[in-house]
Amino acid sequence: NAGVTQTPKFQVLKTGQSMTLQCAQDMNHNSMYWYRQDPGMGLRLIYYSASEGTTDKGEVPNGYNVSRLNKREFSLRLESAAPSQTSVYFCASSAGTGLEGTQYFGPGTRLLVL
Amino acid sequence: GENVEQHPSTLSVQEGDSAVIKCTYSDSASNYFPWYKQELGKRPQLIIDIRSNVGEKKDQRIAVTLNKTAKHFSLHITETQPEDSAVYFCAASIHSGYSTLTFGKGTMLLVSP
């Protein structure tokens, strides 16, 4: 039981490049989330998926898109990366419906945009 | 939307001392308050949570208290140890209300031997 996994662990992009961050969970959780973490800013929600087939914007969605591919997988796409998107990205999942329940986090992806 | 304020941003204590981290929230409908610990370079992990139907919850050296009237909740760590050194985040949401977690900005706790 791996829990929540993320790929890649680290990525360097040039301004304007695109990439997709992958997230998968093997806990049969209903809800999944993408956060970014910046120094002094805590964890800010980018997008979330309350259940398979649904996605919603969080606090800081601009510049990102998401896909809930199936119950296990939730990807985050940067179409045209900007230096302001340099951050650590965490995926999380929770079991309950209605976004309730403990959130379990993945190991994170460190993204540097030059 | 919900706003969560967390203080202090950094806290230094000697091993064996107690540490207290405080958070305030703005939405009186919030009723679920988890605390996460994040060690350097690692993922956040839940250490304790409390729901608004109780005022205090303990788990060994860790306790959380909630004052609904004042809309604030606190994390108490007793007999601190060097391995308690980490960043601690509080959060708030409306349980069972399709409400996402809103996190505080974190407190870096440093426990010196």
Image (tube, grey):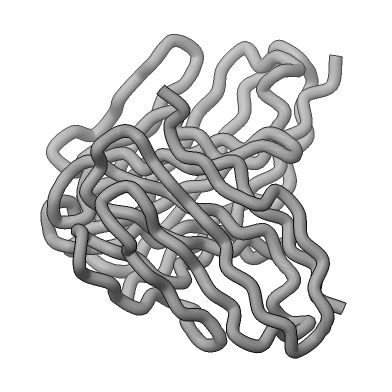
Does residue B70 appear in the picture of this structure? no
Q: Nearer the viewer, residue B87 or B13?
A: B87
Quarter of the image with the C terminus of chain A in it: bottom right
Q: In the image, A9: left or right of B30?
A: right
Residue B105, placed above or below residue B50 = below
- Name the residue: 37% across, 70% down: A67
Q: Position of residue B1 (x, y in %)?
A: 32, 77
**Residue at left offset 68%, top offset 33%:** B39
Q: Residue at x 51, y 41 (%)?
A: A5
> To which quarter of the image does residue A87 belong?
bottom right
Expressed as whole percent of the image width and height from the top left, the position of residue A93 reads: 35, 46
| Image quadrant assignment for residue B55 | top left
Residue A2 position (above or below residue A43): above
Residue A7 % position (x, y):
61, 50
Residue A90 visible in the snapshot: yes
User: Taking B11 as reference, is A48 above or below it?
Assistant: below
Residue that sits furthest to the front in the current view: A69
Question: Is residue B51 shown above or below A87?
Answer: above
Q: Is residue A64 left or right of residue A67?
A: right
Q: Nearer the viewer, residue B86 or B57?
A: B86
